[in-house]
């Protein structure tokens, strides 16, 4: 079984999207479908259920996903040991990122690094923030690029950029025609949110509380693509990073409206690395591309 096929399957489960899984592995959407079909034939079981625009693992798929994630972790650990970095810019660089940062902010930097340093095996894992923190502390990842990084004595946080937050609405919403809105105009609105344990959710909740705005949370997701689809079908409004919704807004699928007092309504993005660890040459080059070079 090909390791790339295993990774593609995991990305498909993580993102809930054939197109996103294709993008993260630099292959076509058709190739993702073909890989999945072959996996299901080889295992004689359905791994993914499809319907209503949603993609979700079956019970068998969940079992396969758990094992596949462990295989990928061990594989990357092995590569790191075998192809350890030297004075040259080569070896393995392991970067973890969350979906809403990796797909929209980090991707062009990843492409630039791959083009400039083909001798480095760059592995980017799209996963949850809590897994990223644990993996960096445990030495399984070198860097993490996350939103709203939270202080940890074992981690160094390097500020990267602040993303503007905007109100995101179905196009037919009463506020969709506004040039900008006050936070209070969202009071008592049905609200589609990230899950409560996600730092971006805690950050947005804090901003709303500071403006004394109370919203009615109707749905919670750990995946920004599902969150946006819920808004599209009228399940509520939300507050999201502008860069995450520009494509859907340009197509007319969603409407984004700036929030007044915009200097406050931002989401900080930071780079995580293990405190006290000396960065290797590949890591230094990647940080330099991000504009946060470590000496």
Image: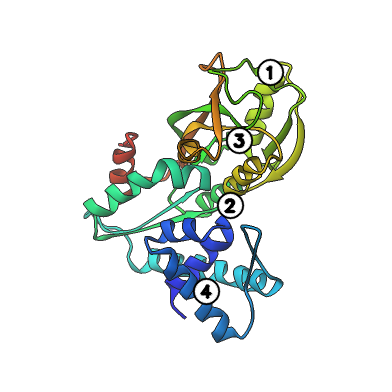
> How far is disc 4 from disc 1 in space, using C-alphas?
45 Å
Q: Which of marks 1 and 3 is in front?
A: 1
Q: Where residue 234 sits in the image (x, y, percent)?
A: 69, 39
Q: Where residue 144 sits in the image (x, y, percent)?
A: 47, 45
Read off the residue under disc 3: 200
Label 3 near label 2: C-beta < 8 Å? no
Q: Which of marks 4 and 1 is in front?
A: 1
The answer to whether residue 123 of the structure is visible from this angle is yes
Between 166 and 144, the residue placed more toward the observer is 166
Considering only order in the chain, which callout, 1 or 4, is on the residue closer to the N terminus? 4
Label 4 near label 3: C-beta < 8 Å? no
Considering only order in the chain, which callout, 3 or 1, is on the residue closer to the N terminus? 1
Regarding mark 1 in the picture, which secondary structure is present there?
helix
The C terminus - image quarter: top left
Read off the residue under disc 4: 36
> How far is disc 2 from disc 4 in space, using C-alphas?
25 Å
> How far is disc 2 from disc 1 in space, using C-alphas?
36 Å
Q: In which quarter of the image is residue 82?
A: bottom left
The answer to whether residue 279 of the structure is visible from this angle is no
Residue 291 vs residue 11: left or right? left
The mark found on residue 131 in the picture is 2
> How far is disc 2 from disc 3 in space, using C-alphas?
15 Å
Q: Nearer the viewer, mark 3 or mark 4?
A: 4
Q: How busy is the neighbourhood of tag 3: few (under 14 within 10 Å), some, or many (20 plus)?
A: many
């Amino acid at each position: 079984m090909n390791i790339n096929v295993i990774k593609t399957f995991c990305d498909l489960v993580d993102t809930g999207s054939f197109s996103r899984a294709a993008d993260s592995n630099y292959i076509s959407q058709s190739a993702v479908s073909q890989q999945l079909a072959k996996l299901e034939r080889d295992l004689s079981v359905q791994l993914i259920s499809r319907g209503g625009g949603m993609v979700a693992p079956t019970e068998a798929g969940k079992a396969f996903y758990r094992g596949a994630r462990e295989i990928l972790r061990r594989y990357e650990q092995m590569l790191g040991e075998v192809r350890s970095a030297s004075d040259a810019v080569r070896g393995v660089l392991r970067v973890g990122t969350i979906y809403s940062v990796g797909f929209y902010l980090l991707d062009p930097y990843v492409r630039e690094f791959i083009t400039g340093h083909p001798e480095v095996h760059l592995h980017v894992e799209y996963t949850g923030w809590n897994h990223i923190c644990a993996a960096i502390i445990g030495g399984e990842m070198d860097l993490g690029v996350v939103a709203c990084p939270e202080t940890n004595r074992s981690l160094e946080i390097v500020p990267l950029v602040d993303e503007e937050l905007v109100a995101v609405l179905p196009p037919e919403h009463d506020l969709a025609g506004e040039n900008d809105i006050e936070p209070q105009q969202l009071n008592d609105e049905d609200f589609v949110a990230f899950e409560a344990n996600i730092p971006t959710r805690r950050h947005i909740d804090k901003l709303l509380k500071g403006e004394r705005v109370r919203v009615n949370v109707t749905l919670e997701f750990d995946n920004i693509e599902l969150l946006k689809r819920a808004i599209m079908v009228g399940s509520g409004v939300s507050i999201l990073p502008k860069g995450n919704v520009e494509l859907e807004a340009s197509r007319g699928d969603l409407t984004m409206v700036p929030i007044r007092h915009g200097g406050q309504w931002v989401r900080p993005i930071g780079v995580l690395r293990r405190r006290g660890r000396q960065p290797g040459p590949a890591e230094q080059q990647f940080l330099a591309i991000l504009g946060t070079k470590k000496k």
